[in-house]
Image (cartoon, rainbow, N blue to C red):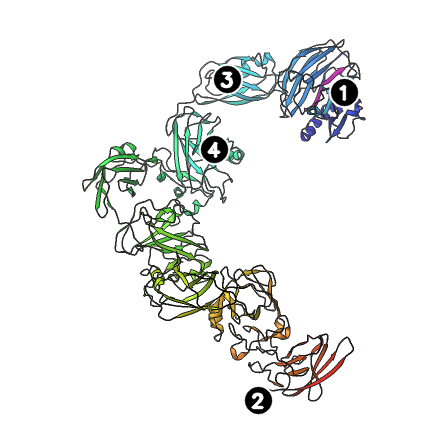
Amino acid sequence: MKSSKFIFLFATIILAHLAGYSQVFDDFSDGDFTNSPTWTGNVAVFVIEDEVLRSNSPGAADYYLSTPNAFMDDVQWEFYIKLAFSTSGSNYADVYLVADNSDLTAVQNGYFIRIGGTPDEISLFKRSAGANTIIIDGEDGIVNSSSNNIFDLRVTRTSDGEWSVFYDKNQTGTFVSGGTVVDNEITSTTDFGVFIEQASSPTFVNKHFFDNFSVAPIPVDETPPVIIGGVANSSTEFELSFSEALDQTTAEDAGNYQLNGVFSTVSAAELSGTDPTIVTLTIDNPIPNGTVVPVHVTNVEDLAGNPMGTQTIDILYFTPDASNYKDVVFNELFADPTPVIGLPDGEYLEIFNASDGIFDLANWTLVNSTTAKTLTSAVLFPGEFVILCDAANAELFEQYGTVIGIPSFTALSNAADSLTLLNPQGVIIDIVSYTDSWYNDPVKKDGGYSIELINPYTECSGKNNWSGSNNETGGTPGAQNSIFDETPDTSSPSISSFQLITNQVLQINFSESMDATSLVNGSYSWNEGIENAGITVLPNFEAVQVELNMPLETGVSYILSISNITDCSGNLIAQNTTIEIFLGQQPEEYDLLISEIMADPSPSVGLPEGEYFELYNASDKILEIAGIRLNDKVFSESRILLPGAYLLCIDEDLALDFINYPDAYILTDLGTTYFTNGGRDLSLYNANNEEIDRANYRMDWYRDTDKQDGGYSLERINLEEPCRAGANWKASIDPQGGTPEAENSVIDNTPDTSPPKAITIFVQDSTQIQIRFSETIDELSVIMAAISIIPELSILSVEAIAPDYNAINIQLAENIQAAITYSVSLSGIADCVSNESMETETLYFGLPQEATPGDLLINEVLFYPQTGGSDFVEVVNVSDKIISLQNWALQNQSATTREITPNPVLIFPDEYIVFTASPSNIAQEYPFGKPENYFKMDVPSYNNGSGSVILLDADENVIDQFDYLESYHFSLLNTFKGVSLERMNFSSPTNDSGNWTSAAETVGFATPGYLNSQYSVEGTARTNFEFDNEIFSPDNDGYQDILNLNYKLEAPGYVATIEIYDRRGRLLKTLENNLLLATSGTISWNGVTDDGMKARIGPHIYVITLFNLEGNTETIKLPCIVAGRLSN
């Protein structure tokens, strides 16, 4: 409203300027109605809110405001009013234009506009001698909102007493006449104001709003009239509309109107008796249908005598022709506007008049699938286009031609949709059912391009008559298609494919749209005594279903000969067209295998970037594919697969991407993201719902961390031993990333001769354990296997676990007891190809107990591995408990947390376990390690210079934490790369810097999975301080590299300073300075001086100064010898 206020105010100021004065003006922008101008009356019940005058009476009342005004001849009153309630006989507003008293409750003579009242109208009243008379009775019900009656009002009075009322409802910018009357009874005034009649209901309180009051001279009209429209009522009558009321004499002068060219002349002109802005012209001779007639108008005047110069308007005369099928066709479809190539970012349809008729599209219907939308008027001439789009996008497409904007335009499906165009009589004019395969281009299919009709003049409008636009902007809205070609079709149709819907219904698919009559009446001739029971033509006329009089039998070759059928252009199918139908056998277990899976095609390394899987006929049978299913994805199309043949399977949305694989099997509901990257359980079933193969693939099947990131398929290795699970799969080694429809690149049919190995044991609960094996096992061999447990526990049952059959479940007859380590021995278990384990294998288990901090210790850390290598963290169980690592985690200094395992993996007393992302790398780098103690997990990243290794239990309690520095390493090493930090003993705190040093060179700089090279048991001093051995050799050879000083004190609270001197009495090392000691412990020296140099060979003296807070002091001197190799 404020923007209109500005326009209104500006116009009012201009008018006032032209007139030289203004009697009243107030827009309340100063926030004050008591000055400039001064309003009087019931000022206490009015307020200004957001620069608008608002009522503020709390209950039922009659109240007013008025301001002086003596101006009423040739004057124009204007104001804004909003009544935010439903008006009635006791709730309305009167605006006094003329009043003889400033107290509007005491006016005897005047004129006022009433807004509301019982009729809900806008009417002009005269008040004479205190009595009201209506002199302009406005339209009843115009004030009809219950909450938002908004009007701009304008009233004019000439000096002759002619009153005119105009209103603009909802501020559209256009004023409508509310009536005119001549009344000159009252000719003087003293005041102008508003009077409110208000009932007591809260509905009406504070809901009267006024603004932009203006009383000013009537603007002088100096503008000539303008032609604003014209229509042809018939072939001999035109109707012209003008911008204002016209002078009757000049408007009805036929000489002021001329027709262009050879058309007839205007014989009569008549000004409307009800609307003086409309003139009807009569011409001598009829105008031909579909003709545009230029009409020239000159010298016609308005009521103020302003003559118009020559103006021209083009008037179309036409009567719509009857429309028939294919008169108007869908010519272009823009369903997927992103990414934008050059067209506006909005969907559209283009229709084209392919006939010689002229049509008005008013009340035609566009149906998208089942949603119907009615079109508005647009004249469509022969050879012209109309663009259909959402109303919100209409302006975007107006640059291309005629547009019909449809409110809530039904979105076009990118993949497929059905569109129908009907005339007002409900006759189908065109119908198209498109799919995104019609682009015939995988790039254009991804968006930004339209699908264009090739030949709009043929009734053969199937998929072969459409293709992706070749225009560089992506489409040709409003113009001839970029692929337009009206060359007649002279090519014979052919059979594109066929499939058995059932063994008694055959569907035949043709290469193009066919003639429906010929499809029904054509010849379909069988051998083997088969006859046709019926022919059904499918939508789009591109396929028929032939029902047979008897079911086809497996293993019989049937020949069907087809003749006397034509495409919709009349081209006859080739003579001697035959198809051979062979009903293959249903596959049984392992006859048909899943041989390849492309689960993560991005980024592509050569193949189309789309998911696929591949089947392989591993039998000596001809197999029928129809009826099988992968999980819930059913193969409906009939296809036979010969022995040793591969079948590529893709979703229909990928057909264009895999256009170079024409034999690919198309699944309509597979989708393009069915195979999750991380893994999925896949089962293949035959038509009898029997499982015939499975592949429960996982990420680790790739066996290559680079290839598992995408672009490579998983291939089955040995197709002759299909029972093998994950061990029988690996990432493709083909440079293209996979081998669809070809022999697998990793194929190796060498027989498996190795028996399965028991690799892991889990305690499921107090009476159940699970053992996992290195490969798929034979479930029958499990029944015959020799299994025993020590201490003895009775076994109730042993069962192989489906569906992978790489683990067994052992159900016990009695509970596993706490704090006991059990061993289970087993032999005689075979893999799925009958390799039986003859040796007895032993694994250990027990009932896990709750861990507390210090039960497991961080014992060795490699945080700076060799280039390309992996970090590792070693922990050791120093308790007497069996502890489960299920849901435990490792964390680093950045709080990055990685779960160790979701399974109940056990660690026994005195057992070591090494966590690493690559056990194979650790085994390669450190040949003295114990790979059987390596555990693969996603270890957090540990910084080279410093960091934290944190061991968390399942409840996120810290069990141990090691805050390491690179300086903990033996400082004389040339490099710390590939060197682990080892804990020296279990008794000293984990974060005691003196409890860590570099692993010895003699063991390869790390001891993953077994006792540390620098490990030493904390000694026991016979006196206060004593060395393990007074002689040590700090050369990092793993033998006596560290000098351990063991101490035992009689009481806590002692502080020690330990200094080391050479034989000449020079201070070499301050080992500890004011160190608060425990009552016992070990302090170690690695032989490095304060200067960072290795101490010289020879005798040295430890000087130990002790004191406590009680004043006890003591100095102890102990000799030691630094030994080493003597150079030659």
Label 1 sits on residue: 64
Tell me residue 993's x, y (percent): 64, 73
Q: State the residue at coordinates (48%, 76%).
A: 928
Q: CA distance from mark 1 to mark 4?
A: 55 Å
Q: CA distance from mark 4 to mark 3?
A: 30 Å
Q: CA distance from mark 3 to mark 2?
A: 123 Å
Q: CA distance from mark 2 to mark 1?
A: 119 Å
Label 2 sits on residue: 1127
Amino acid type assigned to the residue bearing label 3 in the image: Phe
Q: Nearer the viewer, mark 3 or mark 1?
A: 1
N-terminal of the pair, mark 3 or mark 1, is 1
Tell me residue 382's x, y (percent): 41, 28
- Element marked by disc 2: loop
Amino acid type assigned to the residue bearing label 2 in the image: Ser
Label 3 sits on residue: 238
Over which residues does the magenta segment extend?
77-105
N-terminal of the pair, mark 2 or mark 1, is 1
N-terminal of the pair, mark 2 or mark 4, is 4
N-terminal of the pair, mark 4 or mark 3, is 3
